[in-house]
Image (cartoon, helix red, strand yellow):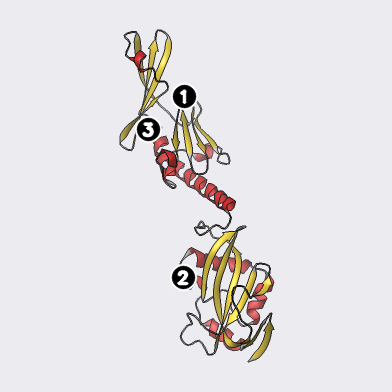
Amino acid sequence: MEQKKIGVFEIEYDKMATKKATERLQTTEEGCVCDNCKNYSRAIDRVPEEVIEFLEELGLDYQKAIEVHEYGIKRGLVSYGGWYHIVGTCLSGTGNNRNVFQITKDYAVWFKNEADLYVDGFPRPILQMEIMFNIPWVIEEPYRGWFLNKNEEWEHNFKANKEALLHELDKIIDISLIDAASDYWIIDSVNDLSIEFFGDATIVYFDKEHKHFDKEHGCEGDSFIIETRLFIQALLSGQARLDIFYRGDKEIDRIYYIKTNNYEEVFKTFTLSRLLKSKETKTVSSIVEFKQQ
């Protein structure tokens, strides 16, 4: 055993015994399949060298935390708690999440003698080193925890929803032909079919009409993404019927009939219903073939 002063803590530990015992442990990712543990395992390699050296000096393998859990994300960094086990004892110093040793700006630890979730066969005595690490989110899977900054949450959701919408549209159009970097996408320049993206809502413009997809128009959560794709798909199906009403040579109204989700939606440009019933009114019907062009 050797003694070491770490901030307000004085510990006694066996580096070689800890290293040997840790070799038999699973890595954090092997022990749990959740995204938070997976990200910790992938991102811990990227922490400052001072942190790695600190852990290794105690005989620890930084890839083999006993437990990790996250508390939220801020500035692109996930706040992780958790602990590692060391063969040793805390001789002095009272540790908690307000009384810690700061290794570097975003990495702090504290110690206690009560061990949680220890592995059978781990040598006694067990010293538990609690961690408070702010680590970047590096895996492809989107972060689904708590956002500690509302602007950051909005930006994250905006990006995630945009990627999801483009993924849905890729099923029915060639998205390489639209300006994906923009938030306004022209699909059919001849018939004025386009989509405007707002982060948590869309508006689909077609000819002289438009349709909203958002919470106020019956789309809860991210359902507006699927609903937008289904509506565009219906327009591109070649079954959009347009009735144009004339009084003499003057167009007085136009009505679109578009079948989506097994029911027919009706879009009226004007509301001159009394004129539509006039004997002087004539109707010209056609199928509008929206297509990517």
Q: Which mark is residue 237?
A: 3
Q: Residues within 10 Å of mark 3 (few under 14, many from 20)?
A: some
Name the residue rendered at 62%, 73% in the picture.
Answer: 98
Dot 3: element: loop
Name the residue rendered at 44%, 43% in the picture.
Answer: 225
Q: Is residue 137 visible?
A: no
Q: CA distance from mark 3 to mark 2?
A: 46 Å
Q: What amino acid is labelled 1 in the image?
A: Lys
Q: Residues within 10 Å of mark 2 (few under 14, many from 20)?
A: some
Image depth: mark 1 or mark 2 in front? 1
Image depth: mark 1 or mark 3 in front? 1
Q: Which mark is residue 238?
A: none
Give the x, y percent position of residue 41. 55, 69
Q: CA distance from mark 1 to mark 3?
A: 19 Å
Give the x, y percent position of residue 4. 68, 86
Name the residue rendered at 49%, 80% in the picture.
Answer: 116
Q: Nearer the viewer, residue 227 or 293?
A: 227
Q: Earlier in the sequence, mark 3 or mark 2?
A: 2
Residue farthest to the bottom, as pictured: 1
Give the x, y percent position of residue 57. 66, 81
Looking at the image, residue 169 lies above or below residue 16:
above
Dot 1: element: loop
Say which residue label 1 marks.
208
Dot 2: element: loop
Say which residue label 2 marks.
32
Q: Earlier in the sequence, mark 1 or mark 3?
A: 1
Look at the numbered discs 1 and 3 and tell me whether their residues touch, using CB distance below 8 Å: no
Image depth: mark 3 or mark 2 in front? 2
